[in-house]
Amino acid sequence: MQVAIVLYPGFTALDVFGPYEVWGRLPDTEVVFVAENPGLVGNDLKSLSVNVVATLADVPSPDVVLVGGGPGQAQQMDDGPLHEWLRTVDRTTTWTASACTGSLILAGAGLLAGRRATSHWLALDLLPQFGVTPSKERVVIDGHYVTGAGVSAGIDMALTVGGLLAGDDVVQTVQLIIEYAPEPPFSAGSLDTAPAAVVESARRRLSGRF
């Protein structure tokens, strides 16, 4: 099985590396990072770069494709090589997936029209302009599309897909290997539980990002 993870300048690291840690540990699975322009691709914090060697054309038929989010997503919304590649590989993927605002890129490519999907909480209201019904669920499956909410939800999405691909016992073994048993010290991880001042602070920090 081949998994293709798309990178572009300004990606958010956990969006893609969380799922990478899960899928890369599944048996008989190859994970390849792909980019429209290979070479060093920098993340949104400008402190991490990944040397991507595979072009989109090098990976014509992955079994799973993942598009993560990040502020660089805004530059990936115009129709072009990435959208064309996504539409092409989507015809044969078992799963077409996203984490965070990667769902906006899938929607911009026309793949999620008429479907339910999730995204980062601050971007949910952008989905309807692409004919997508937004959901506040952490992981949404509709057809062979699976979308994860903001950033850390990519791990939950990857575990969900991993169970469907390799079986629950296998993916639970992976979950134990990576010791994914979150017990955050604060309850500020969602709009429903975060204090109002924290929500306002987050909105200010993310202003103009989407």
Image: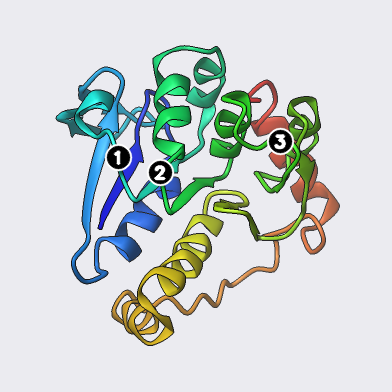
Asked if disc 2 and disc 1 are in contact, CB closer than 8 Å, the reply is yes
The residue that label 2 is drawn on is 92
Task: Identify which amino acid the numbered label 3 is placed on.
Answer: Ala
Give the label, 2 or 3, closer to the camera: 2
| Mark 3 or mark 1: whose residue is earlier in sequence | 1
Task: Identify which amino acid the numbered label 2 is placed on.
Answer: Thr
Question: Is 155 left or right of 202, judged from the image as shown?
Answer: left
Measure the alpha-carbon separation of dots 2 and 1: 7 Å
Question: Is 153 left or right of 134, judged from the image as shown?
Answer: left
Task: Identify which amino acid the numbered label 1 is placed on.
Answer: Ser
Please, is residue 174 above or below residue 56 in the view? below
- Residue 61 is marked as 1
Report the residue at 78% width, 44% height from top. 134
- Helix, strand or loop at disc 2? loop
The residue that label 3 is drawn on is 123
The quadrant holding residue 6 is top left
Question: Is 86 left or right of 201, judged from the image as shown?
Answer: left
- Helix, strand or loop at disc 1? loop
Asked if disc 3 and disc 1 are in contact, CB closer than 8 Å, the reply is no
Please, is residue 155 above or below residue 39 in the view? below
